[in-house]
């Protein structure tokens, strides 16, 4: 099988599987650290819930805003391969800095990881899209397979890293995440020949020649990325300012998409507006979905009975449900989209988004079924199992389809930039998720000898999560109703 399978082939390009493995280890790194982060902030570093939520929200938001810069760097200077390699190396370094164990090193390590992720994340996703010719019906299926790789890494992270952190201490979990990233770099480099044709620098002949005084474009990028690290450290320490930065970047990116659409004519402008509309609904989905690593983890810690056959699961480990369900359902969804497309019954992209948001809302309403069954103000573990199942099926209707949509709607010379814009919508969602989580927050973690008021805690979670459920169900139904109008903006792209 060649690395460039044709559009009529039923097989996927070989490069997809190498990218699958590299992304799996990168996600092991990211989700391993993320699974442990909030409990580390709230318990080990003794921050209150709300400050922990603010730092967590700012960190995860900045992780997703950096791809806006990383995509442009790859499009204009480095190309995808060098951007991914440099980004992966920075992520590994950041994890090992955190292992130092102090609050100071945690914030510096997070800043380094943010820069690394910004280079890695949009460019490896863009490479997957470029492996397929225009109009290739395998593209959605290919992205769903790639998405399984993401969640295999997340599953390993939320079981292995989370339990290692729970039993031996968070620092050991962070170290394990760093080792996983090093494995990802090695795998990516070993498979490089299979995607060399879609990952080269735009001007390889000038990449290492002096251009900015004595600095070559390559060295200038390295220096610029390193200079961003203290800026990100400052933003993590001042989370309110990070919100304004996100807003400013969003205005700039949306403006650039509209300007490009105007330049390319009415059809492309319509596509850009359709893209922007779904970006806004994407924010709603992920702001609610991303409670998983924040308020839902503290909910698991305080008000969920986590005993399974005499063994108590760590609170962070409850995050494993989502990637486990992706692995159970991902292949089925991949097959389903292909068969629906061949039968001419494939729902439009906006309809898929609406159905995804609807299922997310239904997941939160599970708490209304579970609360009356609580024993000593602890709901059974199946509460999270069912909640995460509905969140996962919603995610499979939205997330891989969104990644594929980006590569279909924009001109090829700005795909990495547009992928960065897509991740920017997730950045805004993560920041909003931090604010949303504060609705459940306590002012402080109970001190030694102090008893948590579990009755009040459970009542708060039931109230907040049920309201989130009602609102998101309404948003999903609204998008389903208007989906034919939004779909017209795509001019036949499905």
Image: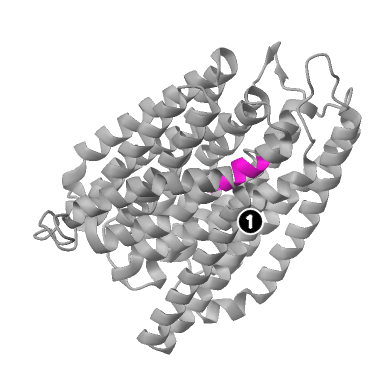
Relative height, residue 451 to residue 87 (above, below): above
Identify the residue at horizontal 23%, vertical 54% (top origin): 220
Q: Which residue is mark 1?
A: 285
Work out whether 490 lies above or below 414: below
The dominant secondary structure in magenta is helix
Mark 1, Cα crowd under 10 Å, few <14 / some 14-19 / many 20+, is many
The image shows residue 362 at horizontal and vertical percentages of: 74, 51
- Residue 331 seen: no
> Is residue 57 part of the magenta span, yes or no?
yes
Is 220 in the magenta?
no
* In-front residue for pair 422/4: 422
Q: Position of residue 138 (x, y in %)?
A: 36, 58
Near-viewer residue (308 or 341): 308
Q: Nearer the viewer, residue 128 or 91?
A: 91
Magenta span: 53-60
Q: Is residue 28 visible?
A: yes
Displayed quadrant of residue 267: bottom left
**Left or right, residue 430 beside residue 15:** right
Q: Count the marks.
A: 1
Q: Position of residue 289 (x, y in %)?
A: 64, 48
- Horizontal relation, residue 3 to residue 58: left or right: left
Q: Residue furthest front?
A: 213
């Amino acid at each position: 099988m060649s690395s460039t399978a044709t559009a009529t082939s039923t097989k996927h390009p070989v490069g997809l599987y190498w990218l699958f493995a590299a992304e799996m280890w990168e996600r092991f790194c990211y989700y391993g650290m993320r699974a442990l982060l909030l409990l580390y902030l709230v318990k080990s570093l003794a921050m209150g819930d709300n400050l922990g939520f603010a730092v967590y929200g700012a960190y995860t938001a900045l992780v997703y805003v950096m791809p806006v810069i990383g995509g442009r760097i790859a499009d204009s200077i480095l190309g995808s391969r060098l951007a991914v390699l440099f980004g992966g190396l920075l992520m590994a370094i950041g994890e090992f800095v955190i292992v130092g164990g102090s609050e100071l090193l945690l914030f510096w390590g997070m800043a380094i990881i943010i820069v690394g992720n910004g280079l890695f994340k949009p460019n490896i996703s863009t490479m997957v899209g470029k492996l397929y010719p225009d109009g290739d019906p395998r593209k959605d299926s290919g992205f769903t397979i790639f998405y399984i790789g993401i969640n295999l890494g997340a599953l390993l992270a939320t079981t292995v890293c989370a339990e290692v952190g729970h039993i031996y201490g968070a620092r050991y979990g962070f170290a394990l995440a760093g080792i996983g990233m090093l494995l990802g770099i090695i795998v990516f480099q070993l498979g490089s020949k299979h995607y060399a044709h879609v990952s080269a620098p735009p001007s390889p002949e000038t990449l290492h020649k002096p251009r900015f005084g004595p600095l070559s474009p390559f060295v200038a990028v390295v220096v610029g990325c390193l200079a961003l690290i203290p800026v990100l450290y400052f933003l993590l320490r001042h989370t309110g300012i990070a919100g304004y930065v996100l807003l400013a970047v969003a205005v700039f990116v949306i403006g650039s998409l509209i300007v490009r659409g105007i330049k390319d004519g009415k059809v492309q402008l319509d596509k850009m507006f359709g893209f922007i509309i779904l970006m806004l609904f994407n924010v709603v989905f992920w702001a609610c979905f991303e409670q998983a690593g924040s308020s839902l983890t503290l909910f698991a810690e305080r008000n969920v009975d986590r005993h399974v056959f005499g063994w108590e699961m760590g609170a962070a480990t409850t995050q494993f449900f989502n990637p486990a369900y992706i692995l159970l359902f991902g292949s089925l969804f991949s097959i389903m989209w292909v068969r629906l497309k061949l039968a001419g019954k494939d729902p439009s992209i906006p309809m898929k988004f609406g159905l995804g948001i609807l299922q997310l809302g239904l997941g939160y309403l599970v708490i209304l079924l579970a609360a009356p069954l609580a024993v000593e103000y602890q709901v059974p573990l199946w509460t999270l199992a069912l909640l995460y199942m509905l969140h996962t099926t919603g995610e499979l209707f939205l997330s891989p389809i969104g990644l594929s949509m980006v590569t279909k709607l924009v001109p090829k010379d700005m795909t990495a930039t547009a992928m960065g814009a897509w991740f920017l919508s997730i950045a805004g969602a993560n920041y909003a998720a931090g604010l949303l989580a504060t609705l459940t927050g306590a002012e402080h973690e109970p001190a030694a000898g102090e008893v948590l008021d579990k009755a009040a805690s459970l009542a708060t979670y039931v109230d907040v999560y049920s309201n989130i459920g009602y609102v998101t169900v309404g948003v999903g139904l609204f998008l389903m109703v208007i989906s034919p109008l939004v779909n017209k903006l795509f001019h036949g792209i499905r």
